[in-house]
Image (cartoon, coloured by chain):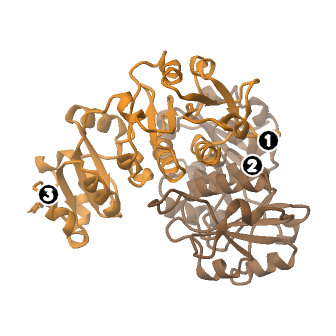
Chain colours: A orange, B brown
Amino acid sequence: MARLVEVDDPADARLSDYRDLRDVQLRKHLESDQGLFLAEGEKVVRRSVEAGFEPRSFLMAPRWLDGLADVLDRSDAPCYVLSEALAEEVTGFHVHRGALASLHRRPLPPVEEVLAGARSVLVLEDLVDHTNVGAAFRSGAALGMDAVLLAPRCADPLYRRSVKVAMGAVFATPWTRLPDWYGALPQLSAAGFTTVALTLAADSVPIEEAVRGVDRLALVLGSEGHGLTSRWEESADRRATIPMQPGIDSLNVAAASAVACYVAARR
Amino acid sequence: MARLVEVDDPADARLSDYRDLRDVQLRKHLESDQGLFLAEGEKVVRRSVEAGFEPRSFLMAPRWLDGLADVLDRSDAPCYVLSEALAEEVTGFHVHRGALASLHRRPLPPVEEVLAGARSVLVLEDLVDHTNVGAAFRSGAALGMDAVLLAPRCADPLYRRSVKVAMGAVFATPWTRLPDWYGALPQLSAAGFTTVALTLAADSVPIEEAVRGVDRLALVLGSEGHGLTSRWEESADRRATIPMQPGIDSLNVAAASAVACYVAARR
């Protein structure tokens, strides 16, 4: 059973995991230095613990204790209980879903382990927006992607915004980082996957055509601004596009990933 | 040619259109009271003016003046020029794309005008998140939706976040609000549209099947939390679902709208 610890001083050092959640730069350093990530909201906190992540602590207002009693029962971590006003002072924003947990990160698995048994894999290159990373995980999980691979510079799926938008899909879907950016796609091809890059390149074919009949498929998407790097675009086995209306320059990457996963699931 | 007005006092009353852009409640009141909306970023500012909206004023740091010279040339509105630090003080956030415009809203057209000639219409019920509204407009425009209709309580497509996420699609796509929530879907049916509601209802069929062979189509999506109201779910001609993996509860509404529009475009 988690120890309930009432806190009335927002400067209390034990709350440092929850400090200034809106300050992205500060949080990135703190979370990677400490090896932690945050789950926000009753549903996501529950899913993080059910997925086997070990809580460092919880932080919530008294009214959330009952709903999360079963989760707290299973943990020995402290649960800091404070008013919503104090929680807002610590975190820097209105915590409207009320419950937070800080959890230990786990070492990322090797690529081979993530790919074992996977038939459909989503590969994200240099996405910078945590919301888009979370959305891609959520859509991928709903629409049949078995695993996710990230380029070395892709935004962190365990950053708070990613976790929240993904609704826990970042816990349930096997994922890891590709250690070698340059060789990543040829290595996937060598492992038996057909790599299909989403792009507006002149030689791209409609996505339905590109995935038709493919057994082991790796769907590859690039960053919000400029899409894939030319290295990834050129080293993919196939280049595919989502047919769009004339005069429209592109889809948002989260929307594109949803459409591509839907089409891939029907190949 | 817009008049360039250098400003060095962040409290200058002429900047009131740009005040506290992060305060959603305050902005909602100010923008509807004043009949204005904001465009943010060089590309979106340009598209708003090209779409024929009349600027009240512009606000930008000196380094954005050249890139928008053609837009400023065509307007008589004042352009407030101030440092990025001052702009941040006024707006309450770091304006990283640098240029803002405040524009006059126009009266919304009647539903019949928006539907005239449209074959595919997106209908949004009570979405609350401006990002999702903007994303639905953007995907709809890219994937062949001719028009958008909004329930009376749906979040505002001209709110700054919606406009930004939509990348200007809220200017290019005809849209209006449905004056009568209760009768909205039967009235669309009477106007010759087959209304297809996205839902997890037990009698729903896969979306591909629901839209197959439909001529004039109205795709209907509900709010982020609970989906469609039972009235809209029940008064639609057909109920459709996007097939998902077992154990996954739903797709984000922006992802669902992208997939539904993609499927609808291929009916």
Sooner in the amino-acid sequence: mark 1 or mark 2: 1
Residue receiving disc 2: B143
Q: As shown in the figure, which amino acid type bears the numbered disc 3? A: Ser
Nearer the observer, B8 or B34: B34
Q: As shown in the figure, which amino acid type bears the numbered disc 1? A: Ser
**Where residue A238 appears, x then y in whole percent?**
66, 26
**Where residue A29 appears, x then y in whole percent?**
28, 32
**Quadrant in the rendering for residue B147:** bottom right
Residue at the (24%, 46%) spot, across then down: A19
Marks 2 and 3, how far apart in space?
Answer: 48 Å
Q: As shown in the figure, which amino acid type bears the numbered disc 2? A: Leu
Q: Chain of mark 3?
A: A
Q: Nearer the viewer, mark 1 or mark 3?
A: 3
Left/right of residue B9 with respect to residue A56 in the rendered view: right
Residue receiving disc 1: B75
Secondary structure beneath dot 1 equals loop
Left/right of residue A49 with respect to residue B143 in the rendered view: left
Residue receiving disc 3: A75
Secondary structure beneath dot 3 equals loop
Nearer the observer, B201 or A118: A118
Label ID, residue A94? none
Q: Quadrant of the C terminus of chain B?
A: bottom right
Instruction: Tell me whether marks 2 and 3 sit on the same chain.
Output: no
Q: Chain of mark 1?
A: B
Near mark 3 (Cα within 10 A), the count class, few <14, some 14-19 or many ≥20, is: some
Near mark 2 (Cα within 10 A), the count class, few <14, some 14-19 or many ≥20, is: many
Near mark 1 (Cα within 10 A), the count class, few <14, some 14-19 or many ≥20, is: some
**Where residue B117 appears, x then y in whole percent?**
91, 61
**Quadrant in the rendering for residue B257:** bottom right
